[in-house]
Image: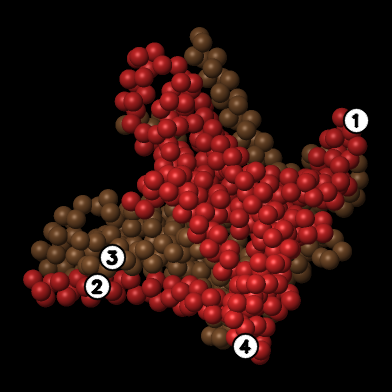
Amino acid sequence: MQKRKNRMSHAFWMLIFPSGLLFFVFFIIPLILNIILSFTNYDGWKTMNFIGLSNYQEALTDSRFYSALLKTFIYAIVNLPFKVIIPLLLAVLLTSDKVKFKTFSRTAIYIPVLLSSLVVGITINWMFSQEYGLINFLIQQLGGQPVAWGRQPALATFIISLASTWASTGFYMIIYIGAINNISHDVYEAAEIDGVSAWQRLLKITIPLLMPTTFLVTLLSTVNLLKEYALIQGVTQGGPGTSTTFVIQYIFDKGFNQSLYGYAAAMSVVIMIIFAVIAFIQFKVNEGGEFTK
Amino acid sequence: MKKNKSSILLTTISVVSALLILFPIVWLILSSFKPSSELFSYPLRLFPKNFTIDHYKSVISGGFFGYIYNSLFLAVVGTIITLAISAMCGYALAIYRDSIKYTNLVFGVFLLGTLIPGETLTISQFSVISFMGLYNNIWGVILPVVTTTTGIFMYRQYYMSVPMSFVEAARIDGASELYIFRKIMLPLAKSTTVTLTLFSVMWRWNDYILPLLVLSDQKKYTIQIAIKNFIGNTGVDWNSILAASVISIIPITVLFMILQKYIVGTDTASGDKG
């Protein structure tokens, strides 16, 4: 028996080893290093002195950091409902017995998910370009004036939001479809026999039973919105001015463009804590959900 | 009769939504075949009047095949490693959950990977990559990203659902632990493997931040970095970027079409009852 236990223990650690090693080298070490660097004035090259909490003090008084953070939060909060509700509605529609061509529709809606964030940005940007963009052309055909999409902060943020939701809808829809298919059909049949209307069935049965999935989608969307970066590079590159420079881009600008690695590391730590707190709150609100089961 | 009407209405809504969502890509593709004179003059048309592949020719003569090769290498090698190590790790975490004490602790550590987004660690990850001498090396963009908590999680979930009696029976027959994994359990997880293959190829093909930072030699650029370089300080080279973007979409879409039934579900017109 003991021999068998040893054999199993041996196999366990052997199977874990490759993932564990790579995870340690490229995740745990950077995590620790990041915390160490945040107390230094490392410039990515030669200088590296410990300067205590200076970076954190600077971050907490850096109005541009606050402004980037605030813009990121507003962006995330405004977009979150669309990121969750649109896929939910499409999933309900595309699991209904009454709907035809479901495979076609599901496939078409999923295709934008395959694009890189950069190409997503480019694709939407191309439709909204100020001169010779399709949207401005249509506006002019209808008698309106062309809109300077890229020049106004609110409009630029709108295009980024549109691109982001467009690209994620299919992915979350598929998660919802999987969850809806797992709901027992008996529940619906019973409700139908009792004369519950389709609309009531959606509100009173489907949506409540999908709460764990909605929690997962909300969590994933929140994190993805807060760390939006590559997509913006395909649309506004953070402009006009710095109006669409969200917090990850701000950190990269400080670190890689201005060689303030230590300062960037300190901001990363602050962001990590914020992310963890948000995830924790959402987790608590949902009382655990099914995520870690 | 009423049922029929609502069926037509709901089908129309879903097909129109699907077409609207697909349209920006259709517009991108059709635009990439228009000569500059049509791209930048009103009125716009849906289909090119003078169909041209000049933009594709110029993008390809700019060395685009090299970038495609680099991206393919990253995607294929990265995915093979991801599949192998995720299956091993997810399997071990599920199958030994009752016999080894530390499984939940180990899994908890891996879950940190989902809690802390990689983007916040990029600065120090880059320092580690440089320190290891992997700067400007394709392995410097492969090795840091192949461990994915998602992949480990997917395999773990799958193997949690497999009855332990499978493993017990094989053990009684005298099969070694690794033999059980490779020959019996791994083939069972086919659908997980297919799904993770598509995800991983997609992630690697679309990787942006690390390649941008790590690969400095133009010959080593991946396709995304090459596309990014059409966005200049003075503006976007639309002629080239449209064609390059379309080229970048093709391989991943073809793979998706092949594996599509595993992802979006097979023909569900009969309903998913049961």
Host chain of mark 1: A
Chain A in the picture: what colour?
red
Circles 4 and 3, Cβ within 8 Å, touching? The answer is no
- For the point 36% across and 53% down, the residue is A292
Query: Looking at the picture, which amino acid does disc 2 mark?
Result: Ala
Q: Percent from the top left, x then y, of residue B16? A: 64, 30
Mark 4: few, some, or many residues within 10 Å (few <14, many ≥20)? Answer: few
Confirm whether residue B71 shows in the render: no
Which residue is tagged 3? B103
In the figure, is residue A57 to the left or right of A175?
Answer: right
Q: Percent from the top left, x then y, of residue A228? A: 64, 57
Which residue is tagged 2? A11
| Mark toward the viewer: 2 or 4 | 4
Which residue is tagged 1? A143
Which residue is tagged 4? A49
* Helix, strand or loop under label 2: helix
Q: Are marks 2 and 3 on the same chain?
A: no
| Mark toward the viewer: 2 or 3 | 3
Which one is nearer the viewer's eye here, A23 or B159? A23
Query: Looking at the picture, which amino acid does disc 4 mark?
Result: Asn
Colour-to-chain, brown: B
- For the point 61% across and 55% down, the residue is A226
Query: Looking at the picture, which amino acid does disc 3 mark?
Result: Thr
Whichever of callouts 4 and 1 sits on the residue coming sooner in the sequence is 4
* Helix, strand or loop under label 1: loop
